Amino acid sequence: MENKELQHEEELKPTFAVHPKKFLLWLFIVTIVMMFAAMTSAYLVRSTDGDWLKFDLPNTFLVSTAVIILSSITLQGAYWAAQNNNRQMLIAGMGITVVLGVVFLVLQYEGLFIDLFKQGVFLGGEYSNPAGSFVYVLALLHGFHLVTGLIYLLIVFYSSVKGKVGSSDLLQIEMCTTYWHFLDLLWIYLFVFLQLNN
Amino acid sequence: MSAVNTSHSSADAHAHDEHDHHDLPWIRQYVFSEDHKYIAKQYLVSGIIWAIIGGLLSVLFRIQLGFPDADLTWLKPLLGEWIQNGKLDPEFYLALVTMHGTIMVFFVLTAGLSGTFSNFLIPLQIGARDMASGFLNMISYWLFFLSSVVMMISLFIKTGPASGGWVIYPPLSALPQAVNGSGLGMTLWLVAMVFFVASTLMGGLNYVTTVINLRTKGMTFTRLPLTIWAFFITAIIGILSFPVLVSAVLLLIFDRGFGTSFFLSEIYIGGEALHHEGGSPVLFQHLFWFLGHPEVYIVVIPALGITSEIVATNSRKPIFGYKAMIFSIVAIAFLSFIVWAHHMFVTGMNPFLGSIFMFLTLIIAVPSAVKGFNYIATLWKGNIIFTPAMLFSIGLVSFFLSGGLTGIVLGNSAADIQLHDTYFVVAHFHIVMGSASFFGMLAGVYHWFPKMFGRMMDEKLGYIHFWLTFIGVYLIFFPMHYIGIAGFPRRYYSWTGFDAFNTFTDLNEFISIAAIIVFAAQFIFIFNFFYSMFRGRVSTLNPWKSNTLEWTTPINPGHGNWPGAIPHVYRWPYDYSKPGAADDFIPQTVPFSATPESNFPHEKDEH
Ligand code: HEM
Ligand SMILES: [Cu+2]
């Protein structure tokens, strides 16, 4: 029996396989997409109901959008550096990305809690309107995910410094890059969405 | 460490683990275990504990409904302040129904069912050493545990647990002033559910990844047992729908804690206007039911998968319409995302929109009927072996059919105006979801107990358990249709004040007595379960003469499941009573070249 099975081993088609960890990450991204899809659908449904405050998004968000796009570029640079085993470029790229990520968060904070406040758009309370509350909730929820992305970046940064990231060890940085690009795209989507529907 | 390394099949990696698992510290073997079989047992035992609690709560409110005039002082030791002057506190009644629903739908029939059987069977039946990520799997269980603890705490706080119904509609759930349970109890409910969803998602990601990536050689998608198909599709539904619940819960949390008005508008409490303006409570219902309806299929599809496997094995016949079974699960899953508004026909929805949702809803009856038909066709002229597992599976088929029929009635938007929020709905979903899914779970436990614990459960106790429960379920829920058609509303603490419903006193009493008997009968199972774990007859390798891979492992499989190489797969799992074959079953590991006498012309090993 045992022998017979072994004999047949070569004849059987191998089953489809992606790296399980990457696959897990992609599925995780799907769950985040669903969450934001629900939120933005709720936004659309609610906005057609009338009593909807109109206001302009603060310019700070334009800057933060530029910053996060830039961070994706620097991270991609770090990834390419890892492919070429260019350690200095790798560490520099990772470092800059982390800094840009933090700058993005600071800008988001400013946009929400300083600029929007000045415009009289609040998260909650007597003078709030769902139109404004949605902007807060969407940006905060995105910000929360961005923090998880930052933690991930720091882990990969640490590995890079330790010399554990290189052309033969790309999995970690590749997954991190995928996740960060996704968070970048997600913000661009939210930004354009809010811009168009406000 | 190299890139080459990462492309190694993780099977190899686990093969190494196997040698050193004995060195694992106690806590990682018995508490924070990453072995899918152990995690499955943790889920099962947690599920059983929750089921007892959930059942007990339902007995309490059935006592209230069946015997509204009775003196309940004797319950004071258990319920304390919730009994006032020998009467159940009306607000606590609402809390009881809410927690009963929450516990049963989420903690028992989602976590307890999928958590147990997806974890246990996916690696064993597809030929994998473990889940794609054992670590994530372990975290998933402990998040569930954390969620359980928070939910449990909410049962004991002074203001009582959440009491706005398991669907937690705002504004009731959003305003602490509305009802005691909307205070701290509701907050704990929301926190618990966030952990719960995180746990479910981690589990689901793992199940999908494992099924796609870690199948053994030869295990193509068309050779997967229907159990695996069911778990796989269930996990996908969960991945797509649970995040939407998170969104709804988040917005609700903001409404409760941060003064936003997503779901609240123009509310007066005690003559005073609240500041909330511009929200829409119906929006919450849309978000909730976008999860809620798929959720009911998350609950029932694993049970249907388990039943497919058990019915084929114990009819000693190939499952009828294997591909049709797969297709109907996929169709049900797809449709389940576009029918949610049938729960909202009476929210003032545009009647034209209502008729679209009615049309989509009624289409679900088609794939559902295909499944029912296929079960019956599989049983037809089989050499049926009535094991307890088989009886529970047949019971499931019965419930799925009779409960599905009332679904078709409810799906008509005009009929639903009368039936919505009556006991007719309660009867519908307790039969089609509650009972069917419970029976699937019980069938699974009876069937795979030998693989879980290396021992057999007692059959005689199994038969008694089955007949009491099966007949009891119909005695409880069948009369509810009748009360419901008469307009008897659900979630009412007391109906004695309404002349129209006084005539149902006897019927309500009857239902309550049946419910108490069925609840008591479950302790036969619980005794059997724990007794057999230690004292049951020792199992043989393949006690049900089944074809699937799990029965090729040792009686008590260790970490890594197979001591040697993982077996390869050469055929589908349903070669029972094949004409010409010596035995009435041919396991998936037997190549066609070994069975020339029974091969069909097209059946050759692939070259
Ligand atoms: C032929 C298939 C089915 C149809 C047409 C159908 C239709 C419906 C409709 C229209 C309602 C809303 C009634 C109302 O609130 O007024 C309903 C409620 C419900 N159905 Fe079904 N159903 C079907 C199968 C199922 C299945 C298979 C399950 C679960 C496994 C299920 C679980 C539920 C639950 C849990 C509720 C009530 C939720 C609540 O309000 O608390 N149904 N069904
Ligand atoms: Cu539904």
Image (cartoon, coloured by chain):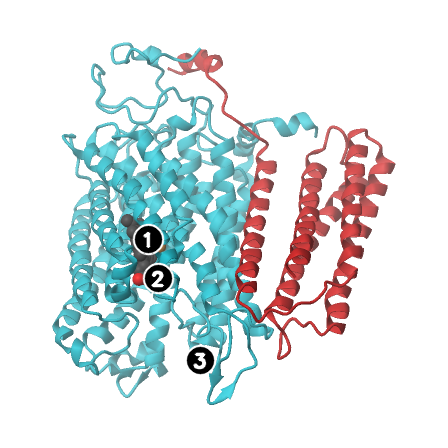
Look at the image and give the colour of chain B.
cyan
Q: Is residue A107 left or right of residue B542?
A: right
Which x, y percent locates residue B477? Answer: 20, 60
Identify the amino acid type marked 3: Ala
Amino acid type for the residue under numbered disc 2: Phe
Circle 1 packing at 10 Å, graded few (<14), some (14-19), many (20+), is: many
Q: Work out whether residue B343 can be spotted.
A: yes
The residue at the point 27 percent across, 57 percent down is: B410
Q: Secondary structure at mark 3?
A: loop
Instruction: Classify residue B121 by image quadrant.
Output: top left
Q: Upstream in the sequence, badge 2 or badge 3?
A: 3
- Badge 2 vs badge 1, beta-carbon distance below 8 Å: yes
**Image quadrant where residue A55 sits:** bottom right
Question: Which is nearer the N-term, disc 2 or disc 1?
Answer: 2
Q: CA distance from mark 2 to mark 1?
A: 9 Å
Chain identifier matching the red colour in the rendered picture: A
